[in-house]
Every structure is written in structure tokens, then in C-alpha cells.
Amino acid sequence: MGLAFTSVGAIIAELVPLESRGLAMGGYNTCIYFGMMLSSASMGAIIRNIGFEHGFLITAVINLFLVGIFYLLMKEFSQIPVKNG
């Protein structure tokens, strides 16, 4: 969250047309906070049933899997050109 939250907001500000930025940022924030709510609720129930050690292991495996998918999708991505002025 510390790395992605601010950088994605900055990318949205750069790439989205001015008249749609509010909608884009609102949609982005809604998805982020909805995901945080779902993960807290689901992991709370999982940890209650299987314990902290196994719950954190499941979370680590899911995160590793998602980072791998992100890497595969982004390895061919070229740098976004920056607008000057």
C-alpha cells in the first residue's frame, strides 16, 4: 500500500483527462477501500478458524502469486513518456 497507493494516484492524475479525474480517483479509492474491507473481514474469519500462523501463510502465498502475475504482465511494459511543460 505504501508504494502503490501514491504512485497509482499520480499516474491517474497524469493519464486521465482533466474532466474525468474526479471520477477516476473516486473509483480508484472506492476499489482500494472496498478491497481493504473485504480482506479484513475474510482474513478475520479465516484466522479465527485456522489460527494466525496459517492465516499469515495463506496471505503470503496469495501475495506472492499476485506479485508473480503482476511481474508477468508488466515485464514487457515500456516506460510511460513524461509530458514536459
Image: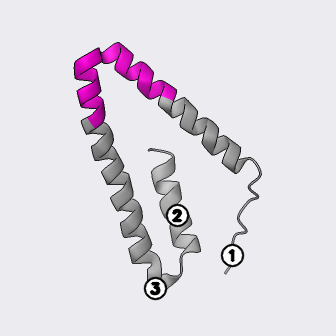
Return the residue nearer the eye: 20 or 39: 39
The kind of residue tagged 3 is: Glu
Name the residue carrying label 2.
10
Q: Is residue 44 above or below residue 29?
A: above
Name the residue carrying label 1.
83
Residue at x-position 41% and y-position 62%: 28
**Closer to us: mark 2 or mark 3?**
3
Q: Is residue 74 above or below residue 85?
A: above
Look at the numbered disc 2 and give the secondary structure of its residue: helix
Q: Is residue 52 magenta?
A: yes
Q: Is residue 50 magenta?
A: yes
Spatial CA distance of label 2 from label 3 is 16 Å
The kind of residue tagged 2 is: Ala
Residue 44 is tagged as: none
| Position in image of residue 33 (x %, y %) | 32, 52
Spatial CA distance of label 2 from label 1 is 13 Å
Q: Quadrant of residue 82?
A: bottom right
N-terminal label among 3 and 1: 3
Name the residue carrying label 3.
19
Look at the numbered disc 1 and give the secondary structure of its residue: loop
- Return the residue found at the far bottom: 19
| Position in image of residue 4 (x %, y %) | 50, 49
Q: For the magenta stretch, what is the residue range?
A: 42-61
Residue at x-position 27% and y-position 22%: 47
* Mark 3 touches mark 1? (CB < 8 Å): no
